[in-house]
Amino acid sequence: MRRICQIVCFVLLLALMGSGVALSVRPVTPPPKETLLSDLKKVNVTDLGEHTKDVGNACFSRDGRLVATGCYDGKVRVFDLATGKILHAFEFGDDGDNSPDKLGVRTQGLQEGVAFDHEGKRLVAVGGWFDPPVALATVFDLTTKKPLFTSRSHYGMVHGGAFSGDGSLVITAGHDSTLKVLDAATGKEQGTFKGHDWVVTAVTFSPDGKSVASVCCNTKKRSIRVWDPVTLKESQNIPLPDRITSLNDLRFSPDGKQIAGVSNWRLHVWEVATGKSLVNAEMDAGLFKRLAYSPDGKRIAVAGGQGGGDGKGILRVYDFATDKVQLVFVEAEVGKESLAISWPVAEKILLIGARGKSAKLAVVELNK
């Protein structure tokens, strides 16, 4: 009987290969027994409305009071989380050329990311397109409700942006393998970091504002680089193993001693001083793209989704003390993918999920 089953499986495999269906194979291990987050109290989900096209990006202010969304309708919206109301709607893009490119598309709206400064008074939105190469990084002032400047200093797409702790600098990460250091008030270029050799996919500041961490994965020299935004000197180079082909998010721990990144279904944590790998935890099913440390640095929330038309948003929490991953939810109501996550206070995790032009705010309340 066993022999017959083996033959049937082999025939089915040959049939699939002959039909042109691509098979993706990775090591399969029995999924761990699901454990619900022990201090989970409840999850509330509310709608963030008025998007007219797909929502592509989002971010929270540091205090968890504001959220910004980037939409393919060409607008960046800022919401008050307490009321769910829109406070600002900024135009983002370049109206110089709206004709389709060689791929048949032209995105004048946001493509890659948004980020608040530490006080929640300014916002940087980044994006662009490839053919012809156009780089866009615009800083908006939420007090005056006007853009301060738009930088086009990269060649091609801008993939990420981050403010320094004191708000004086903005770092932008480009498809051209460089990171630009900009004056956050004027947009004047202060320097260029050239430590990577291909596309820079994520950038973040350390809590003290003295260091920047950036990552490049799609090259043989894949690594996380830690460097000084003033002198542009590199202090750490953390080589990444071949199995890490992408890091979708990058964050320092609250004490600045660790760097965490998430690569699809795995969470990684490194020690900054030595580059030593501290955590390599499997998140199980789903594609995980966003992470946030708890305020005390003892846990990490990792958000993702199952994708597809009927996919579900997923939130899990990794605990350093037990080296375990716990489930918070797998829920279609929050959307099919996660765009932003924040853990501003011990008893609350915030998440933005999306499905097309629908954006949802999930507030996870924890027992004190």
Image: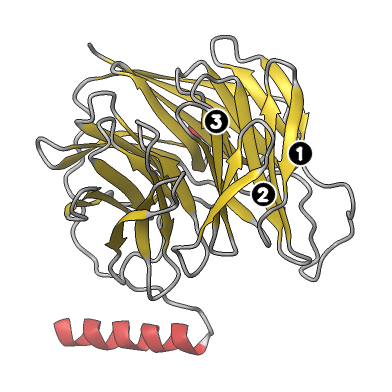
Judge depth for marks 1 and 3 and give the one in front: 3
**Residue 35 placement (x, y as % from top left):** 19, 36
Left or right: where 316 falls relative to 145 = left
* Foreground residue among 363 and 143: 143
Which coloring applies here? secondary structure
226 up-or-down from 360: above or below = below
Q: Is residue 261 visible?
A: yes
311 up-or-down from 198: above or below = above
**Residue 52 placement (x, y as % from top left):** 76, 35
Report the label total.
3
- Residue indicated by mark 2: 127
Q: Are marks 3 and 2 in contact (CB under 8 Å)?
A: no
Q: CA distance from mark 2 to mark 1?
A: 9 Å
**Residue 308 placement (x, y as % from top left):** 54, 52
In the image as oriented, which residue stretches furthest toward the front?
Answer: 231
4 up-or-down from 184: above or below = below
| The label number, if any, that marks residue 168 in the structure image | 3
Of the residues shown, which amino acid type is indicated by label 3? Ser
Query: In which image quadrant can residue 315 be found?
Result: top left
Q: In the structure shown, which secondary structural element does the residue marked by tag 2 occupy?
A: strand
Of the residues shown, which amino acid type is indicated by label 2? Gly
Quadrant into which the N terminus falls: bottom left
- Sort mark 1 into few (<14), some (14-19) or many (20+) by Cα contacts within 10 Å: many
Image point 77% across, 40% down: which residue?
Answer: 74
84 up-or-down from 285: above or below = above
Q: In the structure shown, which secondary structural element does the residue marked by tag 1 occupy?
A: loop
Image point 54% across, 60% down: which residue?
Answer: 178
Lower sequence index among marks 1 and 3: 1
Q: CA distance from mark 1 to mark 3?
A: 22 Å
- Residue indicated by mark 1: 92
